[in-house]
Amino acid sequence: MRDWTRRNVLKSGLAAAGASIVTPALARALDTAGAVAAPGETLDAGAATVPAPVASPRERLLLDFDWRFLLGHAADAGAPAGAGNGGGFAKAGDLFPPSNAKFDASAWTAVNLPHDWVVDLPFVNDKELTSWGFKPVGRAYPATSIGWYRKVFPLPAGDAGRRLALEFDGVFRDATVVLNGHLLGRNLSGYAPFRFDVSDVANYGGDNVLVVRVDATEHEGWFYEGAGIYRHVWLTKTSPVHVAPWGTFVTSAVAAGGASATVTVATEVANESDAATSYVVASSIVDAAGKTIATTRAMARRVEPWSTGETRQQLRVAAPALWSPDTPHLYTLVTTIEANGVAVDRYETPFGIRTIAFDAERGFLLNGERVEIKGTCNHQDHAGVGAALPDRLQYFRVEQLKDMGSNAYRASHNPPTPELLEACDRLGMLVLDETRLFSSSEEGLSQLERLIRRDRNRPSVIAWSIANEEPTQGTERGARIARVMSRLVRRLDPTRPITAAMDQGWGTGITSAVDIQGFNYRAPQTDAFHQSHPKIPVWGTEMGSTVSTRGIYANDKTQGYVSAYDVNAPWWASTAEAWWTHFAARRWLAGAFVWTG
């Protein structure tokens, strides 16, 4: 018999990308002689669970399957089915009727994640819905703008003493999360990842009821955003002493000629216990073939109760295989934490070794060579599935863009799903990573920090974008906001430059706070900017926006058709031939991202 974890299933080829930890039915199918559950998983109702020892390595279990879903109403915050006048916030453990273990959700729709409820709604002929795909969502449609999700899952008694956390890759939007009737928290962003520690309110040795209320009455973009738990949800279990969330930061310096590379690792170790602990960080680098090529072991350090310590290490890699779009070589950092002589955590961080630089005269340099950015701007939704993309579809999209000659991807205009970035890392696609909220508020900086911490080890990410066509982009107020945001980015990741996508006000406002000037359209105006700011690198963060209809060869106003000959563009944009001719003739321009991929 075998412990069938999600990784086992994926490696066996028995599950598609994005499959969950093995379900009871699949476990029985995989091993009819009697499958053994992964630690913390129940095979079926009434079966014994397999307890996980407190000191065991971490588990990260996918919670995508067996949810129940129901549309609510924006005027009813308490939930349907006899919610009454609320009052669930009066006493802890009584929030939302569906959180009750005896609540009957059998009439709710069975769904698996990722899930976008908007894509299934009917089309509505309302011009106010133009930017939302003509789907009835928003304040004007309260009956279809609230979604309730409910999932029941077991936890073994042996998990008591471990640290448990629920991790959401993204929920659109304004999610209130409740476990066993206890409020975990609220997350406003529809794109930033978030997590809640559930160790205190978990039900060990029994079922746990997870309820998520999603409120999509407000929007964050001017494009189709969908609604719901449209990205993966995970349950992470660790020892009290463990690598903190997104707690590794890997950087590299390549020696002249590429003979070797020095890899620097910063590891944050959390001690979520009542006793001070001595810990040791051991780090290894594994190549793509699975061979360990470098190891190091730090001196023991002390971390106080309920605090975090940091260990810095360096490892040398001989003759490194450099990451690039043509050769997307990846390594894995394996971090082992030992506490009081016991290995209590093991954490893997994929990364790449490469150098990047933006030069005001030579454009973008990757591994010392000039690479022309031939990028596309991309929203996250896809025809037919809305915002809830299967993992394989993320890979398909990147594959298609590469086949068309693209080498760069701008996440427009929000943090992308992790699986998209994984595809870019593995297939070889440069990424401009972008936050959604241009803000120096606590909420805005929190969203930005989560983006940076999550993505700063990815070799595909070459720059951070903090803004897109903001009304304050050319003002002193915009400059103040941008300076605070940029200060945070540089503290979290000093290895990548910062940019902003501006469609006016170049040289003023936000320009003073970023490293690369982004131009949205108005390609000819790059000349004047370069002349007045010769030391600032420039690229096109959004170019083109040619309009055309495939298979149509003449403009037809009656039918609403435009030809496919690259001759039609809005007043603020340009044809592909016009903008690319301009960029190709100027070596100091790093390249551009066309609207859209």
Image (cartoon, rainbow, N blue to C red):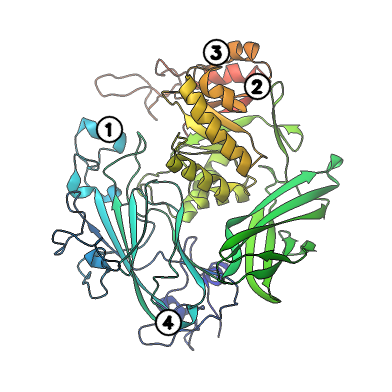
On screen, residue 5 versus residue 590, left or right, reads: left
The crowding category of the residue bearing disc 1, from other C-alpha atoms within 10 Å (few below 14, some 14 to 19, many at least 20), is some
Say whether residue 424 is visible.
no
Residue at (47%, 60%) from the top-left corner? 18
Structural distance between the alpha carbons of marks 1 and 4 = 47 Å
Please tell me which of labels 2 and 1 falls first in the chain: 1
Please tell me which of labels 3 and 1 falls first in the chain: 1
Structural distance between the alpha carbons of marks 3 and 2 = 17 Å
Which residue is tagged 3? 524
Structural distance between the alpha carbons of marks 2 and 1 = 38 Å
**Element at badge 1?**
helix
Asked whether disc 4 touches disc 3, contact meaning CB atoms under 8 Å apart, the reply is: no
Residue at (41%, 23%) from the top-left corner? 471
Labelled disc at residue 43: 4
Residue type at mark 2: give it: Ile
Residue 310, located in which quarter of the rendered image?
A: bottom right
Asked whether disc 2 touches disc 1, contact meaning CB atoms under 8 Å apart, the reply is: no
Residue 163 percent location from the top left of the image: 51, 70
Labelled disc at residue 130: 1
Which residue is tagged 2? 536
Which quadrant is the N terminus positioned in?
Answer: bottom right
**Element at badge 2?**
loop
- Between disc 2 and disc 4, the foreground one is 2
Please tell me which of labels 1 and 4 falls first in the chain: 4
Please tell me which of labels 3 and 2 falls first in the chain: 3
